[in-house]
Image (tube, rainbow, N blue to C red):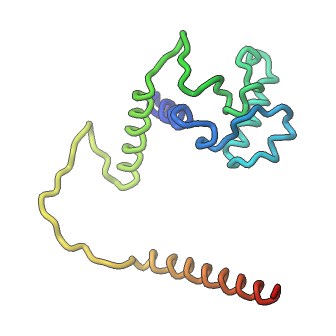
Amino acid sequence: MSDSRVAAYIAKYATKGAESAGTVDRPVKEPIQIEDLRVSEHARRMIYTCWALSMMPGFDHLRLKQWSHMLGYRGHFSTKSRHFSITLGALRQARADYRAEFARAASGLLLVGRETVTVSQWRYAGSGLSEGERFWAEIARQQISTARRIKRENERQKA
């Protein structure tokens, strides 16, 4: 795994508050509480992992159990360590660079270095939905229509 990928992953959580990162703002006292938390499955697994690691030899100094609600990250997200420090700007830039590289790769635009492609002419490319987009839009329309019909029927039955 590359350094920039690790930095991007850390930046994702370090530059957000607990709630916006998908976790909670209060400590988890017992592992049984984790199942009832209103968090994403990813955050739930990370909280469980903090608890599991906290019981393994060599990890007790990290106090992962006490900070599991913050995904193991102690204190305020922008607290700096004396042993390791990086600016939030550097974290955000690493994350932005990683996401841009990922987007370029996904669209087949892998570029060497930091090049900017400039297109000097505009042309009409078309309008409307593609065949695949049209299909999914129709599915969504049908689901919304069905949900509205069911709601109307339920309201009529209650009245």
Q: Is residue 91 above or below residue 79?
A: below
Q: Quadrant of the C terminus?
A: bottom right
Q: Is residue 117 above or below residue 51?
A: below
The picture quadrant where one finds residue 123 is bottom left
Tell me what residue is drawn at x 56 percent, y 79 percent. Answer: 139
The picture quadrant where one finds residue 71 is top right
The picture quadrant where one finds residue 99 is top left
Image position, residue 63 (x, y; %): 74, 20
Q: Is residue 22 above or below residue 88?
A: below
Q: Residue furthest left?
A: 120
Count of number-bearing discs: 0
Depth check, front residue: 2 or 34: 34
Tell me what residue is drawn at x 55 percent, y 14 percent. Answer: 81
Image position, residue 37 (x, y; %): 77, 45
Depth check, front residue: 88 or 124: 88
Image position, residue 112 (x, y; %): 27, 39
Q: Is residue 24 above or below residue 56?
A: below
Depth check, front residue: 51 or 132: 51
- Name the side, left or right, on which 73 lies relative to 36: left
